[in-house]
């Protein structure tokens, strides 16, 4: 029977990554002046678990590497060594290294041991630098006595045909759950496995006290065991391994002198058959006894008997074995892209959330059966009951919806957790002193949104650190504290989650931004822009006012990508800044991806939906507001902007007649930081809609981000506002080619 | 069939042990630290207890010490799952009252063999 | 669509096939009988108004809500460049599903009427003769004769693939037929040169 261990791999990887996160945050939280024992313990435990699991599941390289790490941690936690900064730094590097190794293994690739081997050398150097623990010398001593012992045995005659064992258990041997009978049984199996092997057990009752003084839990018996088989001493020692310390056990090779004489009463006949044919051999008696009986140079004379860690059945590196995935492991990602690291497609949910869900479904079922019954015997008198039932249904559904959405919600601390380390490393690299404050870590958001917001957040923090914060001298010269502060703040606001990245640095430099924008032709020389508009320019593609393109940020491809990533999540990002005081980036995200607050509009016979978050305002057009450029393209002045006017019916080629713009309904939307005015026929209501995929059975359609099903069961398409802004350009190029 | 309580803070170890033992016909219950295990042990009698040593909240040594105080568990075999190859660490388990140990890493076969020997 | 036909479909889907035989649902369009593998048929519905999808090929009528999934509806006459007809209460939409590399895809096709279910063995089918390479022949898997009627068996996978290349070809054909452009005269000149 062989069990495929690869089915447990995914769980092992997940818990190991979590363990590494704990190690990292604990290491960062360590105050070397006042070392908290529990923190050290949790770091040790994390490494220990990873080592154990790695060994069990066949990842021997990881296990071997983690072993040295664990050894040092063990010395620290047992007080044999003080922890120093050098150690903390090394441990942190190990965390990174292990992350890499485990990721490789998770992706079924060969782990690159180069860094690990280097680190191992460093650890071994540290470990060797101090006096070796008592254990290692004990080990070597006991090893040598063991060798001496076995040598002694071998030196004599190696063909022993049997053993005589004196077994005197301590009185409370039973209280540790050990059973002499079990050991005898094992011994017997061992003996009888040999050809003509057998065993005889003779109990000694001398120590039995009077009945009145007997404690039933105590063991007053001892035994002499004759084993008539050629078995190894080490095999027998293994059987008694667990009790060897508190019991007296002597092994003697059988010789003429110590043979069981035929006359001795054989109470033990029931236990083992007697074979008197065993011939005597001359040997030297080998004595093994409890530590207190023999003076030893070290506490341990007994050689170690360890169950060999056998090579695990399922080799982790075997790609074929890894393909056999049971329903336990998340299969989706692994099945579809075997080369890619299995994405974490599972989620931990608190039982309360599940219970809440179950309750709600229960209520839904009740409402449904009530409505069902009503439907069976309905007449107009019952209209009120019907309305009540429907109201109940709406409530149940809403609660269910909220509950289900909550399942995918996790606290944002998962996304924030990488920042202490990031800020620490970066501030070292940039030689700036930085404090990181994180607020609202418990604020929950959708798991997928959180996974995708990570990179943009990292970019913003790096950006603040690199460009926003001044170095210590500059700060003190300006009357600021020498430590700069970066604050991450998350909170819920009106159905959205708001995440702020705030720094108390130099703030955005309006002049520089404005000049750069003019340079890039984004803004006219004499254009007046509000502060907000200038600040907003940094989200343009290719925009960076960094004087030196640093490794950290400043390649100029950052902010526009950040904005785009956030837009993909149906969110928005804005910046406010004050020169000399700092900047605050605010990201606004819907609480879930699949549901959208929508504004319904009518164009011709069809209903379309605009994401509410993208609508700036809606106005009724008057021709006087419009200017006509190039004969075809209308623009309108909206405060300080000129925005292009598009008719949705043209974008979507509905074939309707050209629209008269006088009195038409205009929806001003903003996507990609550009405002566009869209002419529709009519504004309908606002409602929450569930986003359904159009691509699943059809194709990606330009300017459409998805579809939804309205209350009447019909389909309405959701407009992709960022896609619309490309349209004017395309139209122009079309015109140009036609002219040519 | 015999009932076994498996205690380990590592989910993957628990899964592997449970899967192995259940496959061999044993009834298995899990706990992720000594405290949880103690709670379970108080409500139900198991034929064998397997416990990791290093666990949060209550470690294996403390768990065994407390377990042995429960009348029902005086003689129940308790095996420590330990990665400690050092002799004195094994003895700590024994001193607390454990029956014996199984050294990690072990494979499912070794686990089953040891358990079979102990339970008979 | 007749109850008998629906019943036949139900029986067919649940029944076992003999080795060579496959069952086909047949339908009528412009007087011709066509067949599709019954395993690709998810259900049959009556016509209901669709939501128009912008900038779609003209054989895509739009999309409908099929129990919560958005499903595109294709007018097969249009797809085959046949004359369009008015939809009537007996107009039928066959909902088909196929496996593509992107996953399962569901689409509905509008046909004149559903005909029958036939068990057809592969060996009885014949390849369609080498005809003019036009759009239609791509969808034809084979031809078969049942009771003196020729049934055109369609390749559902191809049918449901909105091939972008084909799309452009169709658009260009449409353009060219609409307005003879300078392109043609250039082509003529080229021809004369040869």
Image (cartoon, coloured by chain):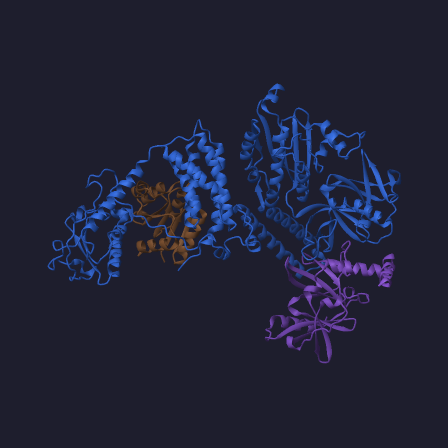
Q: What colour do you see for chain C? A: purple
Could you say which quadrant of the image residue A542 lies in? top right
The quarter of the rendered structure image containing the N terminus of chain A is: bottom left
**Residue B71 location in percent, x, y?**
31, 46
Observer able to see residue A222: no
Front residue of A391/C4: it is: C4
Please determine whether, in this image, residue A191 is positioned above or below residue A438. below
Task: Give the vertical position of C105 relative to A721 (above or below).
Answer: below
Give the residue at x 46% y 36%: A91
Question: Is residue A34 rendered to the left or right of residue A651?
Answer: left
Identify the hue of chain B. brown
**Camera-side residue: B26 or B20?**
B20
A66 relative to A434 in the view: left or right: left
- Which chain corresponds to the colour blue? A
Q: Position of residue A433 (x, y in %)?
A: 56, 26
Residue C119 locus on image (x, y percent): 65, 75
Number of marks: 0
Looking at the image, residue B52 lies above or below residue C27: above
Residue C140 appears in the figure: yes
Nearest the eye: C177 or C121: C177
Decide which of B62, A216 is in the foreground and name it.
Answer: B62
Q: Residue furthest left?
A: A263
Q: Residue A227: where, in percent of width, then height?
A: 20, 56
Work out which residue is located at the far front of the displayed protein and give it.
C194
């Amino acid at each position: 029977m062989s069990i495929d261990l690869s089915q447990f791999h995914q769980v092992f990887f997940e818990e190991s990554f979590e363990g590494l996160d704990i190690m990292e945050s604990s290491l960062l939280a360590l105050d070397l002046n006042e070392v908290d024992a529990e923190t050290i313990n949790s770091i040790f435990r994390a490494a220990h678990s990873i080592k154990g699991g790695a060994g069990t599941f066949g990842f021997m390289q990881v296990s071997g590497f983690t072993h040295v790490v664990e050894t040092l941690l063990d010395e620290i936690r047992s007080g044999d060594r003080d922890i120093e900064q050098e150690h903390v730094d090394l441990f942190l590097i190990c965390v990174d290294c292990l992350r890499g190794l485990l990721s490789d293994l998770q992706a079924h690739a060969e782990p690159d041991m180069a860094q690990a081997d280097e680190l191992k050398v460093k650890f071994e150097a540290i470990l060797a630098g101090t006096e070796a623990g008592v254990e290692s010398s004990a080990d070597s001593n006991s090893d040598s006595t063991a060798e001496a012992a076995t040598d002694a045995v071998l030196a004599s005659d190696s063909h022993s045909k049997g053993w005589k064992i004196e077994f005197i258990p301590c009185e409370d041997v039973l209280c540790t759950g050990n059973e002499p009978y079990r050991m005898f049984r094992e011994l017997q199996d061992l003996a009888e496995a040999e050809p003509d092997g057998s065993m005889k057990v003779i109990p000694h009752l001398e120590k039995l006290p009077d009945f009145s003084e007997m404690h039933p839990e105590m063991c007053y018996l001892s035994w002499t065991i004759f084993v008539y088989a050629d078995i190894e001493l080490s095999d027998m020692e293994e059987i008694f391994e667990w009790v060897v310390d508190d019991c007296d056990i002597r092994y003697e090779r059988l010789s003429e002198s110590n043979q069981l004489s035929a006359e001795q009463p054989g109470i033990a006949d029931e236990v083992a058959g007697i074979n008197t044919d065993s011939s005597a051999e001359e040997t030297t008696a080998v004595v093994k006894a409890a530590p207190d009986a023999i003076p030893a140079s070290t506490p341990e004379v007994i050689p170690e008997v360890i169950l060999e860690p056998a090579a695990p059945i399922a080799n982790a590196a075997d790609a074929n074995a890894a393909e056999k995935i049971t329903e336990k492991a998340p299969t989706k990602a692994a099945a579809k892209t075997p080369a890619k690291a299995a994405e974490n497609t599972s989620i931990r949910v608190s039982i309360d959330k599940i219970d809440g869900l179950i309750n709600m479904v229960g209520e839904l079922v009740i409402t449904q059966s009530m409505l069902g019954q009503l439907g069976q015997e309905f007449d107009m008198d019952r209209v009120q009951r019907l309305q009540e039932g429907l109201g109940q249904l709406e409530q149940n559904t809403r609660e269910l919806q909220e509950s289900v959405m909550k399942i995918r919600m996790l606290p944002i601390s998962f996304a924030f957790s990488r920042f202490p380390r990031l800020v620490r490393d970066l501030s070292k690299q940039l030689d700036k002193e930085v404090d990181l404050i994180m607020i609202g870590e418990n604020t929950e958001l959708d798991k997928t949104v959180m996974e995708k917001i990570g990179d943009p957040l990292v970019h913003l923090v790096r950006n603040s650190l690199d460009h926003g914060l001044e170095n210590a001298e500059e700060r003190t010269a300006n009357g600021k504290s020498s430590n700069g502060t970066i604050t991450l703040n998350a909170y819920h606001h009106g159905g959205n989650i708001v995440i702020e990245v705030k720094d108390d640095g130099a703030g955005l430099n309006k002049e520089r931004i404005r000049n750069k924008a003019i340079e890039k032709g984004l803004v006219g020389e004499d254009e007046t822009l509000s502060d907000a508009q200038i600040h907003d320019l940094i989200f343009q593609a290719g925009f960076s006012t960094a004087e030196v393109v640093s490794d950290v940020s400043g390649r100029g491809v950052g902010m526009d990508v950040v904005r785009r990533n956030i837009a993909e999540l149906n969110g928005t990002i804005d910046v406010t800044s004050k020169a000399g005081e700092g900047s605050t980036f605010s990201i606004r995200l819907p609480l879930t991806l699949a549901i959208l607050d929508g504004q319904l509009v009518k164009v011709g016979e069809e209903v379309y939906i605009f994401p509410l978050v993208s609508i700036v305002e809606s106005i009724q057009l008057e021709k006087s507001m419009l200017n006509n450029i190039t004969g075809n393209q209308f623009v309108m002045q909206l405060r300080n902007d000129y925005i292009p006017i598009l008719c949705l019916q043209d974008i979507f080629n509905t074939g309707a007649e050209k629209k008269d713009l006088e009195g038409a309904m205009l929806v001003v939307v903003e996507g990609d930081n550009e405002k566009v005015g869209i002419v529709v026929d009519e504004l309908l209501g606002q409602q929450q809609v569930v986003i359904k995929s159009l691509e699943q059975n059809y194709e990606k359609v330009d300017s459409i981000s998805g579809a939804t099903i309205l209350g009447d069961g019909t389909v309405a398409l959701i407009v992709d506002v960022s896609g619309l802004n490309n349209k004017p350009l395309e139209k122009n190029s079309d015109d140009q080619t036609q002219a040519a | 069939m015999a009932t076994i309580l498996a205690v380990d803070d590592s989910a993957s170890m628990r899964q592997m042990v449970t899967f192995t033992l259940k496959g061999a016909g044993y009834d298995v219950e899990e706990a992720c630290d000594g405290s949880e295990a103690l709670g379970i042990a108080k409500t139900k009698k198991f034929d064998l207890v397997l416990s990791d040593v290093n666990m949060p909240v209550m470690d294996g040594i403390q768990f065994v010490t407390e377990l042995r105080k429960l009348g029902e568990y005086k003689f129940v075999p308790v095996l420590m799952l330990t990665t400690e190859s050092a002799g004195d660490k094994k003895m700590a388990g024994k001193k607390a009252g454990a029956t014996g140990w199984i050294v990690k890493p072990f494979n499912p076969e070794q686990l089953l063999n040891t358990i079979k020997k102990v339970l008979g | 669509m007749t109850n008998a036909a629906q019943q036949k479909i139900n029986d067919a889907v649940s029944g076992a096939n003999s080795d060579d035989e496959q069952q086909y649902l047949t339908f009528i369009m412009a007087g011709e009988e066509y067949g599709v593998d019954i395993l690709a048929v998810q259900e049959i519905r009556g016509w209901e108004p669709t939501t128009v999808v912008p900038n779609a090929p003209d054989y895509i009528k739009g999309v409908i809500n099929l129990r919560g999934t958005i499903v595109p509806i294709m007018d097969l006459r249009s797809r085959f460049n046949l004359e369009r007809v008015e939809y009537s209460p007996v107009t039928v939409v066959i909902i088909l599903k196929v496996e593509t590399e992107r996953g399962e895809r569901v689409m509905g096709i509008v046909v004149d009427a559903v005909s029958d279910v036939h068990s057809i063995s592969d060996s009885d089918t014949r390849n369609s003769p080498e005809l003019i390479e036009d759009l239609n022949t791509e969808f034809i898997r084979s031809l078969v004769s049942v009771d003196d009627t020729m049934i055109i068996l369609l390749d559902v996978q191809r049918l449901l693939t909105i091939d972008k290349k084909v799309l452009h070809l169709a658009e260009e054909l449409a353009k060219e037929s609409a307005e003879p452009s300078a392109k043609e005269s250039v082509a003529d000149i080229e021809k004369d040169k040869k």
